[in-house]
Amino acid sequence: MTRTGHDRRWSARGIAAALTLLLAVLLALPAATGSAFAQVNPTTEAVREEQLMQALDRVTGRVSIPDRNAATLIQVEGQEWRAYHERTLAWIGGIAILGMLAVLAVFYLVRGRIRTDAGPSGRTIVRFKWFERFVHWLTASCFVILALSGLNVAFGKSLLLPLIGPEAFSTFSMAAKYAHNYLSFPFTLGLVLMFFIWALRNIPNRVDVAWFAQGGGIIGKAHPPAGKFNAGQKVLFWLVILVGAAIAVSGYILMFPFYGTTIAGMQTAQVVHGLLGVLLTAVILGHIYIGTLGMEGAFDAMGNGEVDLNWARQHHSLWVDEEEHKVAEGKQRVPPAAVPAE
Amino acid sequence: MARLKFLCDADRCIECNACVTACKNENEVPWGINRRRVVTINDGKPGERSISMACMHCTDAPCKAVCPVDCFYNTADGIVLHSKDLCIGCGYCFYACPFGAPQYPRVGNFGSRGKMDKCTYCAGGPEADLTAAEYQKYGANRIAEGKLPLCAEMCSTKSLLAGDGEIIAAIYKERVLKRGYGSGAWGWKTAYRETIDV
């Protein structure tokens, strides 16, 4: 068979030789260039669980489910939150509330009920108008139910469940949860109104420093002057407004879960809500004590709005002067004298 | 007494989602609830791994610890179940669960949750075994029939293993030894406080 000039260039032997040369070069390359061409085995270099867990708090990946929470594979903060909620909060809440009750009991036994030294005068002065009392009672009654239903979440299963059994406790807790969620709105409204009607009267001033210096009349027997709200009441006012606001905000975050928060956000909101809730409850126990049992004549202020004049002079002398000044200047009509008690 | 556990061999999972489908079908899981899901780590990169995750039925389950109405209970095999009758839908179990197992149907006011639903290890719930009421609330009760969860039974590569903890750990160990690598029994340290040493 004759061959043309073209065929002679690409003989079978020539091709074999070229390929062998190519192969030799390729095999030599790794040795020449080092690890750049080394075999990569992706399976042995796969992520290991301990690796990821050490590097991140939570391990996330890709899922085909629209719910973003499902993309998290493991979040161990859940266990920290569990330890906080079951142990830390229980201790803090227990100490705060039982501790406060113990302190109040001791205080009552030692100091007794704070009396009006001059005795009842038979005359009264208007202290809180109907709107002020309405706002107070709106907020207060909501707070009581919110506090009880909140305490049920934290302590109910230890204290109440053994007494009434699981079915009754569950029904009660469900009702408590609804009450807690719905009453949050009037409570928040009460806080906002309270701020608007009383914030200006609760701005601290020099009188308050002097009031604290004299122990407020609670420690010791002094009768330091005070305006409409004494320093202790101002502290309570700002605690209620600020801590109450924080509780409300964290509560709304909890009530609208994952609307802009991740699971870490929800855990934080729950920590804030529960912790501030038990602490504020302890403070309010003190407030309830002093407004009812702890001080003669105090309840009338919020009860019917009128307080005994001697009581007012003893505890809020500057405010009485202010009110009498207003009457003298004709800005205010004379507050009605009470009918003397029989 | 057997201690039932799950083990997902991440090196075998091919993300086929047969486990997810099997669970949804067997338990008539409603729309939007995902008792089991497949999560892919490092998707598209070398070393990509997929893990099938549902309730791990932890020792000292955090969901059980935080529930305000104590609606969870353990069976003798270590399965963690709960009562939908007692559940108040507060959502705490989801905050505590390291694996995101609790799911909620989201029916109710203020984005509230309804009754929690989760993987039951195909062991039903507190209702009487194999009744219609149990099926309607909790899904199938295969354990009462002497069977294992359907997700593991349907796994196409046998990466998802369910059964007595010692047996499945032994199977996994054998695999790791044979092939020379293993990314670990995902979730075991968190759920059961043990690792599989090879």
Image (cartoon, rainbow, N blue to C red):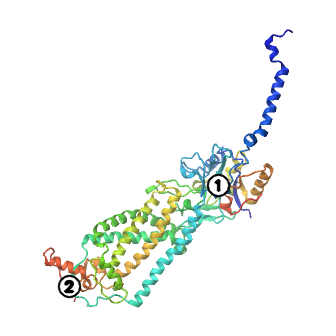
Relative to A8, residue B71 above or below: below
The kind of residue on which mark 1 rests is Leu
Q: Chain of mark 1?
A: A
In the picture provided, is A60 more to the left or to the right than A43? Answer: left
- The residue at 58%/68% (across/down) is A83
In the picture provided, is B37 more to the left or to the right than B1? Answer: left
Badge 2 crowding class, 10 Å Cα cut-off, few under 14, some 14 to 19, many 20 or more, is some
Task: Give x and y (percent) for residue A86.
Answer: 56, 70
SS class, disc 1: helix
Question: Which image quadrant for residue A289?
Answer: bottom left
**Residue position marked by numbered label 2 in the rendering:** A123
Which quadrant does the N terminus of chain B fall into?
Answer: bottom right
The kind of residue on which mark 2 rests is Arg
Q: Chain of mark 2?
A: A
First of labels 1, 2 by sequence position? 1
Q: Is residue A148 visible?
A: yes
